[in-house]
Structure formats: C-alpha cells, structure tokens
Image (cartoon, rainbow, N blue to C red):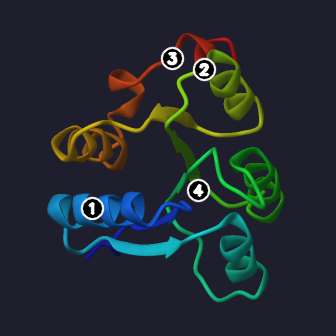
Amino acid sequence: MMKPQQIMIIDDDADDRNFFQEAINNISPVIETHICDSGIQALALFQENKIATPDFIFLDFNMPLMNGRECLVELKKILQHKITNIIILSTSDMKEDMEDALRLGAKLFLTKPNTFQELCIMLKGVLEGSWQKLFSHPASSDM
C-alpha cells in the first residue's frame, strides 16, 4: 500500500488556509496536510526535524515577516537533496513574480482561484501530476 501524499501549506491568511484544507479534504481525506501560518514556522519545523519531507509545499508569495521569495530560497537550501515540489500559490499574477519564483526553484506558480471549485480542480491537477499540461507557463519552458 502506498503511503498517503504529504503536503504543506504556508500562508499567513487564515481564511486561505482553511479554504485550502477544505479543498484537500474534498479531493482526498487520506492526504496528510501540515499547515503553517508563516515561512518562519515552516522552516523551524524542518530545522528541528519535526516534520517529514512533504511531497508538495504550497507557498504564498505575499506574506509579512518573511515573504515567499525569502522562504523559497531557505526551503531550497534545507530540502536541497529531497524531492519536494514547491508550488507558489499567490494572489499575484505579475510576470516578474512568476519568473522570479521559477528561477528560485519553484516548480509552478499558480494564481489563487476565486472559487472553491476552481481551487479543487487546480489542486487535484497538481496532486495527480497533470499540472504540467494544465498549467504550463511560458516562463517555465525557458528553464
């Protein structure tokens, strides 16, 4: 039997974290989800070995204290030899943010959807590995 997927969400917005958790439960109740309200909290979990390496990390780009760029750089240092897909999930749709995130090592940059149904479809695509087809961005093909 395969072990359930493990994912982490790092987002400072409580509503977005709850929305995300509800969407994950809707997709599959066996997915293990770890929720952090800041990059600082997430990095501490890894540095203190309090969490197994997740399959996916969904990282908000616009956060106080430590923004998504800073957190992404630190996560890449900590997880350098681990296979973890770091997905930026942000309200930003600026090309510069997208290119920056992909250059820093994010696998994907997604703009947060407006509806619960859109979020479920997006997350299901990412978790099933069909995101390369569904969400390809021109910037990622240049890498």
Q: Which mark is residue 33?
A: none
Q: CA distance from mark 1 to mark 3?
A: 24 Å
Please report the residue visible at 56 percent of the width from the left and 49 percent of the height from the top.
85
**Callout 2: few (<14), some (14-19), or many (20+) C-alpha neighbours within 10 Å?**
few
Which is more foreground, mark 3 or mark 2?
2
Q: Is residue 72 left or right of residue 106?
A: right
Tell me the amino acid under the disc marked 1: Ile
Circle 3 or circle 4, nearest the eye: 3
Q: Earlier in the sequence, mark 3 or mark 4?
A: 4
**Local SS, label 3:** loop
Q: CA distance from mark 1 to mark 4?
A: 18 Å
Rendered-image quadrant of the C terminus: top right
Read off the residue under disc 4: 84
Residue corresponding to mark 1: 24
Q: Which residue is mark 2?
A: 94
The residue that label 3 is drawn on is 137
Kind of residue sitting beneath label 3: His
Lower sequence index among marks 4 and 2: 4
Q: Residue 55's x, y, as percent?
A: 49, 61
Q: CA distance from mark 3 to mark 2?
A: 12 Å
Label 3 or label 2, whichever comes before in sequence order: 2
**Number of other residues with Cα within 10 Å of mark 4, as a class: few under 14, some 14 to 19, many 20 or more:** some
Callout in the foreground (1, 4): 1
Residue at point 57% right, 50% down? 60
| Image point (64%, 89%), residue name | 50
Residue 57 coordinates in the image, percent (x, y): 54, 57
**Crowding near the residue tagged with mark 1, few <14, some 14–19, many ≥20 C-alpha atoms within 10 Å:** many
Note whether 77 is above or below 117 in the view shown.
Answer: below
Secondary structure found at label 4? loop
Place residue 16 in its image quadrant: bottom left
For marks 1 and 2, give the CA distance: 26 Å
**Mark 2 residue type:** Met
